Image (cartoon, rainbow, N blue to C red):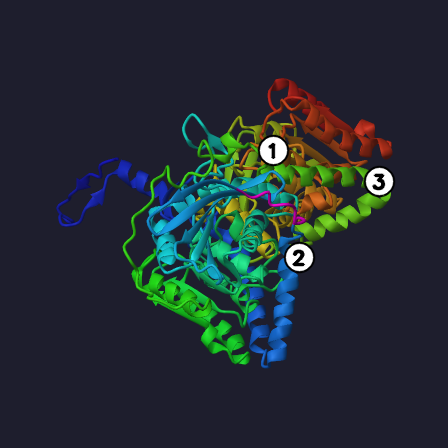
Amino acid sequence: MFRIKYLRSVKSADYPVLSGVAFILLFSFSLINGTLYSQDETDVISNWLEYTDAPNLLYHHLAGQAYILLSQRTDKISEIQTLADWQQRQKQIRETLTDIVGPFPDKTPLNARIVRTIDKESYRIEHIIYESQPGFYVTSSLFIPDGIRKNRKTPAVIYCSGHTAEGYRSAVYQHIILNLVKKGFIVFAFDPVGQGERLEYYDPATGKSVVGGPTREHSYPGAQAFITGSSQALYMIWDGIRAVDYLLTRKEVDPAGIGITGRSGGGTQSAYISAIDDRIHAAAPENYITNYTRLLQTIGPQDAEQNMFNLIFRGLDHPDFLIVRAPRPALMITTTRDMFSIQGATETEKEVERIYKAYDQEENFSRVEDDAAHASTKKNREAMYAFFQKHLNHPGNPGDEETRLLTEEELRVTATGQVSTSLDGETVFSLNLKIADKLDNELNTLRNNPDRFQAGMIRSARKLSGYREPAKVEEPVFTGRIQRDNYAIEKYFVKGEGEYVIPYLLFKPAKQGNKSMIYLHPSGKSVEAAANGEIERFVSQGITVLAPDLIGNGETGPGALKGDAYFDGASHNLWYLSMLIGRSITGIQAGDVARLTVLLKRISNEAVIYGLARKEMAPALLHAAAFTEEIGSIILVEPYSSYRSIVMNRFYDTKFPPGAVPGALKEYDLPDLAGTLAPRRLFIAGPTDGNGSPEDNVGINKDLEVIKEAYRYKNAEANLKIISGGSGEPVYESLFEWLK
């Protein structure tokens, strides 16, 4: 805290005047998005009113593209008039969902076993463990009411838990489950992966997850799954599909009377599972369904399992999870002050009503609303009970009743209370690792034919990354100059791919040589811009240096979109948004590096342009250099060696995934891009693994060997230099010798 002094004069006795110190302090800070933002002399746009929301430029750019795609979808839906048209839409949704979520695993034996039975006054609980995939254990509980008639099948409701660490054992979820049981329904509740007794990063010493709460338990392995072209959603949906398989083995269960519900994250699961598995007759997702336009206008994308690869790009939105089910019964359970926009929910309702009307079964679809936040309410619970009583043909009193909650011991399924310490088994990480190994073997086979592989790989990299060739490079805007000994720093911004701008610093030596450099630092253009900083080292060699804040970095990031998957200053949620629209952050940044390369050639008219990238900025430079030959020499300082390395490390540096291209490992990896640079000069200093460590010599060397082999194939070994250590005088000496 600092104190502002009030100075008074005879002429202005009634007006407070800030003291000199306070005046300086006041103008040294600006409030952007509710955070105190320190203004630096190297800032380019921080004092421009036009760019007061600069840290959110990446979000606005991505969301703006999403809105266009969503508007196109709305136009197509508005043209649907007949039942035949709607049925064609349903066919398209099924095929698209299967394509973007799948392929699903083969159905293998469930190996289900009842490990404990708990008898209560009016029902019993059978604690069950089944394998949705071999060795992938799902903890679950089957609640069976007393008095089930022997000769009559009973309807069953699958209950999906929201984002609570205890899963279906939470008091709120227990209350709903036990009310359904009181009304005569069989209820099957299972732990979502990463919750309840299925924590995948469980620490026995603390009894908690080492990566955080449920959403982080999902997003941490979910990021790795996206890189292989899989998803966290696939594993969670498949668990639910296999839950249906198990119910159909039970003689008490009516196979035509299966319902599903769940709130929040459970609403997500119930919407997804019921959209894909048509054996579920009635679905009632709660506190989730809205639409993407309103979601992006409000809270933005959430954790990993709530995002599907290219979903918006492929023309889908939340309403499609319900449209594809028609005319089977569906109930939207909503609240007016939910974090999932109620406006989006009402818009979805209007859209979905149309297909039920076309089927002439309007009574099978409805929405209930209560005035509450993101919560379960009595009104909504009773509407849900009544919905299942009607549509699963099990009439009774829909009133919400008092329940006696079960104890932690009564609801424990495994011997220790955690799968990891009782059974071990597979995890999302280990299952995804098998996919990564398979993809790596396929890539190794393709690498045996370099010419054919590289040509196709570059096309795939352009497409998967969402790279766009810069069609036009506008004139930059000059905003100021800083004069230093023997060089000047000029401040500019230039228009990027969209409506955003790229702030950059241009370091101009008094005696310019014949080299220019684009310098990319993960913390932005200013971090090494001080006197005696790293950039000055290059300028002192007569090199003109352009240091930008690529969108999402420095003055233009990371923005206010944090959510539950915000790791160490790197927003995974922004990355999810990019993949929803068929883009990647790296692809966009690579396009801007190409744009800046054109600009730098225009400014300096030099024959040689270098590109230097540190750490997690290396993928953007590699993609840009692979797509354009204007960058003659490339320097990578402490880059992670491959996307594969992120996937192979159970614990990885969470700053790395936003630089990954989703699905890349199906077609290429970073060493492959580096190999395409041959015979251009490439300098790599201090490569690390996916956890930012240089210690994994086997894995790092395997990646480097891919690059070396590509350079050998082009007889360009002399143009490739790889050294250990990413900083220190020996590295600089080696680098400056190489620059000569």
Which is the main secondary structure of the residues drawn in magenta?
A: loop
- Label 1 vs 2, first from the N-terminus: 2
Horizontally, residue 386 falls left or right of residue 496, namely left
* Residue lying at the far top of the rendered structure: 730
Mark 1–mark 2 distance (CA, rounded to whole Å): 36 Å
Which residue is identified by label 3?
450
Which range of residues does the magenta coloring cover? 105-113
Q: Residue at x 52, y 45 (%)?
A: 572
Image coords of residue 308 (percent x, y): 58, 54
Image coords of residue 577 (percent x, y): 54, 53
Horizontally, residue 14 falls left or right of residue 302, namely left
Which residue is identified by label 2?
99
- Comparing marks 1 and 3, which lies closer to the viewer? 3
Using the rendered image of the protein, determine whether residue 654 is visible from the camera's viewpoint. yes
Is 41 situated above or below 48?
A: above
Using the rendered image of the protein, determine whether residue 51 is visible from the camera's viewpoint. no
Q: Secondary structure at mark 1?
A: strand
Question: Does 106 appear in magenta?
Answer: yes
Mark 1–mark 3 distance (CA, rounded to whole Å): 28 Å
